[in-house]
Image (cartoon, grey):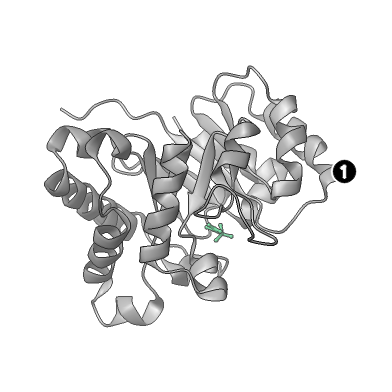
């Protein structure tokens, strides 16, 4: 029997929403999701973390995350933010390995592995993103690719540390494109990832692991995806910027 995994709905705002608009958006979402039966995670730009942390203080199932961090805790790295800084702000999660970081900032799994270790050392929880490109899927290489990404990113990560990691399966061809993986495609990949991690660690660890789906999730497709037992939540980009859409997704997660 699989262990209970509470669903997690995470909104990655990317480089959107002004600091002066952030509290309003969060309040609108929390008002529209007052009967939520899942964990909710807001992932705004760094500049909003402090004010949003204060806003959602002491709300049991609502969390704050950052979109990235550096692998070092301090030093001459102009423009970077360290895991220690995020921890000092009481940030709960950090997203690592997002496809936009890989594509536009040249991040690879070796670097992401270093970042994961540094984040975990600060007791931050990690959302690790992986996913194949359209050409990799068309060539039937999507499972090989995910296996390679995960083996590299999780190298040297213990089973105890794994319990602080959430995986987001995000096919690159579905991010911001309006194309969504079908519930069957998503479930197939989630099952594959769970078996992979069960083999790398243990069946118990695999059963406890939360695996989110990301890629053009919106109000109209959320229930189909989230009703699948292997899909433990969603990492949402575009639709997390619209309170009514994001609330529909939250309310579909039971
Ligand atoms: C994302 O950025 O992780 C994402 C899934 O974006 P979107 O929902 O816009 O496809």
Residue at (53% x, 66% y) in the render: 101
Residue 89: horizontal and vertical position, in percent?
66, 33
Which element type, helix, strand or loop, lies under badge 1?
helix
- Which x, y percent locates residue 130? 38, 60
Q: Residue furthest right?
A: 20
Q: Which part of the image, by quadrant, shows the N terminus?
A: top left
Please give the name of the residue rendered at 55% of the width and 44% of the height, measured from the top-left corner.
83
Q: Is residue 162 left or right of residue 176?
A: left
Q: Is residue 133 depicted above or below 92 in this figure?
A: below
Within 10 Å of the Cα at label 1, are there few (<14), some (14-19), or many (20+) other Cα atoms? few
Residue at image point 31% right, 37% down: 161
Quadrant in the picture for the C terminus: top left
Rendered position, 22 above or below 38? below
Ligand 1 lies under 8 Å from the Cβ of mark 1: no
63 relative position to 132: left or right: right
Instruction: Please tell me which residue lies in front, 254 or 116.
Output: 116
Q: Could you tell me if residue 55 is visible in this image?
A: yes
Residue receiving disc 1: 20
Query: In which quarter of the view is residue 58 placed?
Result: top right
Instruction: Identify the residue at horizontal 77%, vertical 34% (top origin).
Output: 51
Figure check: 218 above or below 26: below
Residue 91: x, y in percent? 60, 35
């Amino acid at each position: 029997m699989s262990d209970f995994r509470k669903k997690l709905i995470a909104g990655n705002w990317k480089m959107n929403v002004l600091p002066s608009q952030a509290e309003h958006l969060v309040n609108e979402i929390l008002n529209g999701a007052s009967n939520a039966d899942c964990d909710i995670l807001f992932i705004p730009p760094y500049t909003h973390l402090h004010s949003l942390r204060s806003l959602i203080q002491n709300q049991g199932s609502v969390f704050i995350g950052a979109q990235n961090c550096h692998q070092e805790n301090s030093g001459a790295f102009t423009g970077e933010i360290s895991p220690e800084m995020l921890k000092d702000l009481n940030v709960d999660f950090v997203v690592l390995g997002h496809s936009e970081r890989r594509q536009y900032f040249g991040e690879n799994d070796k670097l992401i592995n270093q970042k994961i270790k540094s984040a975990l050392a600060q007791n931050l929880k990690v959302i690790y993103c992986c996913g194949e490109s359209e050409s990799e899927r068309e060539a039937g290489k999507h499972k090989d690719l995910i296996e390679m990404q995960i083996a590299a990113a999780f190298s040297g990560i213990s089973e105890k540390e794994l319990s602080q990691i959430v995986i987001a399966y995000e096919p690159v061809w579905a991010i911001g494109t309006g194309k969504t993986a079908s519930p069957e495609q998503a479930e197939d990949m989630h099952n594959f990832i769970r078996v992979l991690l069960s083999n790398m660690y243990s069946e118990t660890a695999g059963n406890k692991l939360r695996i989110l789906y990301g890629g053009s999730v919106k109000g109209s497709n959320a229930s189909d995806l989230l009703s699948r037992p292997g899909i433990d939540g969603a990492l949402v980009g575009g639709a997390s910027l619209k309170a009514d859409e994001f609330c529909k997704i939250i309310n579909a997660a039971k």
